[in-house]
Structures are given as C-alpha cells and as structure tokens.
Amino acid sequence: MRRLLPLLLLAAAAPHLAAQTYDILIQNGRVIDPANDIDAVMDVAVKDGKIARVAESISGDAEKVIDATGAIVTPGLIDIHAHVYGYSGSIFPDDTALYAGTTTVVDCGGAGWMTFDDFKEKIIDRVKTRVYSFINIVGHGMVHEWESNTADMDPEKTAAKMAEYPDLIVGIKTAHFGGYGWTAIDNAIQAGELSNKPVIIDDKIFTNTGRNSKEKLLEKMRPGDMHTHAFNDRQVEIVDRITGKVQDYVWEARKRGVLFDMGHGGGSFMWPVAVDATSDGFYPDTISTDLHSSSIMGTKSDMPNCITKMMALGMDLPEAIKRSTVAPAKAISKFPEIGTLSVGKEADIAVFRMEEGVFALFDAWKKKMLTHQQLKNILTVRAGELVVDLEGLGYPKWQEAGDYVSIR
C-alpha cells in the first residue's frame, strides 16, 4: 500500500500538472485574426507577455480570466498615421490610442532628423503604446511649422538618422509643402532611396502648386510608397469630379504597388469622395486616423470610428480588421512582428463590442451619415499587460473578492 500511495497521489495530481498556467485567458470571443485566416469563436491565452495559445477551447488556470462572449477579439490595431510629437495638435498616445484598441501608432512627420532624439526621449521611451515614426524630410519636423522650408530638407542627414534607428523609423513623410513644384517630394523620395524605406505623402494639388495627382502617382511615387488622405481631393484626386468614377491613373498606380491610406483627420475625409470611390470598388489599403487634438474632439476619428465608417461604406468587418492590422504592418515592414495573434508574438490584443442602434458618423465637413452598427473598444492588452478594461471583465465582482471587507 505504501508503494501504491505515491502513484495514486501522482495520478490524482496529473490533470493539474498537465494544465497550463496563464497570465490572461480570453474565452469565448469571436477571434478575427486575418494573418492566420481565423474568424471563429475561440480562446486566446497569454503568458509572459506573449501569445501562448489560440484554440477553440483552452483549459488551465489564469491570473485573469476574461469572458468575451458576444465580443470581438483582434490583434491590437495599428494606426500608421497619427500625431504624437512636434505638431501643435499632437496628443499623448497612452491617453488616446490604447482606449481605442490601438497598440501601435506611427507618428507621421512630427520629428525630423534634428528633433528625432528629443521625440524618442520624451515620447517613444516613456509610453506603453508602441510608437514608430515616419521621419519628416524637413530637419525640424513639424516643430515651428518648418515644412515649406526647402533649405531644411536634407535627404542625406535624414537617411543617416534613419540608419541610427532602423527599428523605430519606418519611413519618410512629406506634407503641407506650400511651395511650387516637386521639391519636397523629390527630396523625400531621395531619402527613401538612400534608406530603402517608403515615403508617405500629404500635399496639395491646387493648380497654383504645379503638382497633379497623375504625375505624382505614376511618375514620382514608387511601389510601396503611400499617399495618405485618400478621400480628400485636395491632396490626391481619386475620383473624377465629372463622372464620379475612380480615375484610371489611380487604378494603374495601385496596380504598380502605390498604397493608399485613409488618414481621416479633421480635414481629410469627405463623404462625397468616399461614397463615390467605394461605390466604384476603391477602398483604402490601410485604415488610419490622422488623429490630433481637433479631430479627436470633432470627427472623433479614432480607429474604431474609422473602421465603422468603412463598414458603413460596404467593407465587411474581417476586411476592415485586416486593413487595420496586417496591411499596415506589411506597409511598414513590421509583419509578422506585429498585427497578428500568432503564438510567440508579443501579446497585443483588442476586444470590441459591435453596438446596434442608430449612430451618426461625421466627415471632415461635419456632414453626417447614419449607420446601424458601431464598433466600440472595451478592453486592450499591450505586451501582455491589461491596460484598458472599460467593463471590468478582467476583475472579479466584489461579492467574489476574498479580501472584500464591509465597513458598515
């Protein structure tokens, strides 16, 4: 009997020994992970800051067990056009991105080669949100509104700064150039050639600028370069203003690898352009916010809002999640490091509810479209840490908390 006792005890303990212990276990949510072609009710387990397992049913103990029944679970969203430094309207990412299920932002041109180290010290190194940068071709960046100063454009020094921080600086930005001709774009593309990184462009095409969309998209921009503000015809004319159809040169540019980014912002998304373009089958390759202090208060165009707008225009949810995770990750050459729930990758997770009702969606001119669905973030995990939990899903009810003490 004494010989059998250890065996009996070991047999009794076997299920517990086999069971995994996780930091976070999200159960019963609709998991949408386009990178792994997943769209099903599944569980997601997190351990030591990484995705430990994704399966139909995961057993085991967890420090936090989250019941996501009826909710949508996705990789953390990636916003490749945000403003968190340099620009007077920049906003602190931890206060805005994480609450929207956005775990990665790319600051779009706030810093140039002269100001990037300050940006890194004051923002990148201090926040929970993962922050990358499109470095401005202007050395000062958006600090003090230098963006039309051609004397401050230096492709060599820009490329040299990018070589210092190849993991943080993902491309070059040119924007708001008030001069005539192609000087800003040519300098940005030269820096792109020197660094082998993409350029993201935001510039006006008024007749007095000497620039036009066709030449820019077909002759200046390279495969992999991006034009942001796709649905604002002051920066790029996607739709023919007479026929309402997408321009032939736009389809040709897309075919040769030029990417089109949403870049909503406070002045760069207009319903007439968006409706005509999407009715003709043209949607942005990447969904982004151009979020800053006025747009977050006016159009309220965070990532869930932008996804909701794309759904109102006919895009299904899995495709919208793809263009908010996998597509931007690939555009900045960070896939599969981010944008996925693959096992072993850093655990960036967003949980949403799809609210039903009547909701007003506003464009840059405060014109509204009504829709019956709205995506709302309720929980965010960043690098394995529960950083946002608006419904308290990761915490026990007070009746179940063992250390609760009544003071009555």
Image: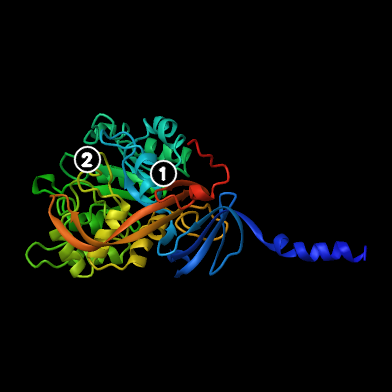
Cβ–Cβ under 8 Å for marks 2 and 1: no
Taking the image as drawn, is residue 282 in sight? yes
**Relative depth, front residue between 219 and 200:** 200
Q: Secondary structure at mark 1?
A: strand
Give x and y (percent) for residue 55. Answer: 55, 67
Which kind of residue does numbered mark 1 sit on? Tyr
Q: How far from the left and from the top, in percent, is residue 298? A: 20, 45
- Location of residue 76 in the rendering, given as x and y in whole percent from the top left corner: 43, 54
Q: Is residue 332 left or right of residue 289?
A: right
Residue toward you, 383 or 339: 383
Label 1 neighbour load within 10 Å: few <14, some 14-19, many 20+? many
Check disc 2 and give the amino acid type: Ser
- Separation of residues labelled 2 and 1 (CA atoms): 22 Å
In the rendered image, the vertical position of residue 8 relative to residue 86, given as above or below: below
Residue 305 lies in quadrant: bottom left
Left/right placement of residue 376 relative to residue 211 reads right
Q: Is residue 106 left or right of residue 236?
A: right
Locate the N terminus and report the quarter of the image it occupies: bottom right
Q: Secondary structure at mark 2?
A: loop
Against 319, residue 303 (above or below) is: above
Q: Residue at x 40, y 29 (%)?
A: 118
Depth-wise, is mark 2 or mark 1 nearer the camera?
A: 2
Q: Which residue is mark 2?
A: 294
Where's residue 106, x and y in %? 37, 45
Q: Which residue is mark 1?
A: 132
